[in-house]
Image (tube, rainbow, N blue to C red):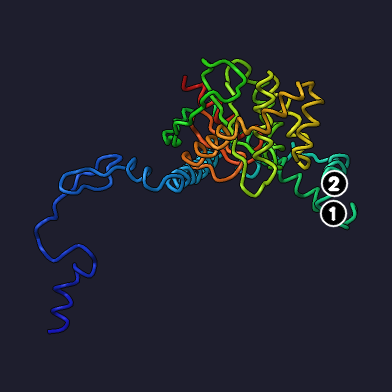
Amino acid sequence: MKNLLLLFCLPVLLGIGCSKKSAPVIQVQPGIVAKINGKEITDEDIRKVMGPEFVRAEMELYDVKKAGLDQIIQDQVLQEESKKQGISQEELLQKNVDSQIKVTDKEVEKFYNDNKGRFGEKKFDELKGNIQFMLSRQKRGEVLDQYVAKLRKGLDIQVLIQATKLEVPEGDSPAIGPDKAPVHMVEFTDYQCPFCGKARETVNQVLSDYKGKVKYVIRDFPLSFHRDSFKAHEAAHCAGDQGKYWEMNKKLFASQKDLKVEDLKKYASEISLNKSKFEECLNSNKFAERVRQGLEDGQKVGVSGTPAFFINGRMISGARPFPDFKEIIDDELAAN
């Protein structure tokens, strides 16, 4: 009897039910996650409730899916090419990638000297082998990416997943580039953040390589634990009152460890601002509300750290290398 009962209810245990009648089919519509008495609840409703947490989750999910998709496409592209040439994939990579990787002693020594502060008491001879290995791996990744990109051009590849895009307010923030540029890049930054300082090289390369095609907008996002940053952001806008926002911007990023009020006044003199007008502006907190607005706008679109960039609404966090920006900008330009 027990065995008969178990047999009878086995479909239940398997989650498919004991009834011969099929369960009603619920039609799921994109973006709709629930209904209450016929009233729809959407992803957008969740976004409004969860705010930055939901946005970050969407961004992270896209990044994971995109990384996985890129790996699958790379594997298939290499398989196709190895079949075409009649050689193994290992031979293909040896011929077109590994043979191109050369790291010289000068490159290793330069890396050591540029990063001495990170190595403590360790001498060059102790680290030479590790640095050589690390630079070789890095260079291999770059060469492999270039080779795969070349092979992809000859294939019909359609990437259909889409990144989450957000409406990022620009306001009347300082900007470089034409308003009608097809790509708008908004950065939320902090003058006391070392990673923001490091990102200047990439920002400048974007502005140089995509002149006329990218409008770059800078927004204030001084982090609370950077005590001197808020006033530094005010100082940049005070300099902007005299037509020298970008001159002060450059000074502040070049002097991130010295952003006390007295330092700000010194920089104002160095870029030939009217001293009394600058100090009056700084002392009156004239631009404090604008800085706070930058923080508020950034938080609404999921910014929690700096630098945070939005390229046509697509978020890219941190001081990432130029190729990461180039990939997104090229995608956006191709779509316009």
Q: Residue at x 10, y 63 (%)?
A: 19
Quarter where residue 14 is shown? bottom left
**Residue type for callout 1:** Leu
Q: Give the Cα separation between the discs numbered 2 and 1.
A: 8 Å
Local packing at callout 2 (Cα closer than 10 Å; few below 14, some 14-19, many 20+) is some
Residue 41 x/y as whole percent: 26, 44
**Residue type for callout 2:** Tyr
Residue 28 x/y as whole percent: 24, 44
Quarter where residue 258 is shown? top right
The numbered dot on residue 127 is 1
Kindly indicate whether the residue at mark 1 contacts the one at mark 2 (C-beta within 8 angstroms): yes
Residue 132 x/y as whole percent: 81, 48
Give SS at disc 1: helix
Local packing at callout 1 (Cα closer than 10 Å; few below 14, some 14-19, many 20+) is some
| Residue 101 drawn above or below residue 175 | below
Q: Is residue 145 left or right of residue 54?
A: right
Q: Is residue 10 left or right of residue 222?
A: left
Please name which of the two marks, 2 or 1, marks the residue nearer to the observer: 2
In front of the other: 55 or 217: 217
- The tag earlier along the polypeptide, 2 or 1, is 2
Q: Residue at x 47, y 30 (%)?
A: 157
In this rendering, the count of numbered labels is: 2
Q: Which residue is mark 2?
A: 112
From this viewpoint, is residue 96 visible?
Answer: no
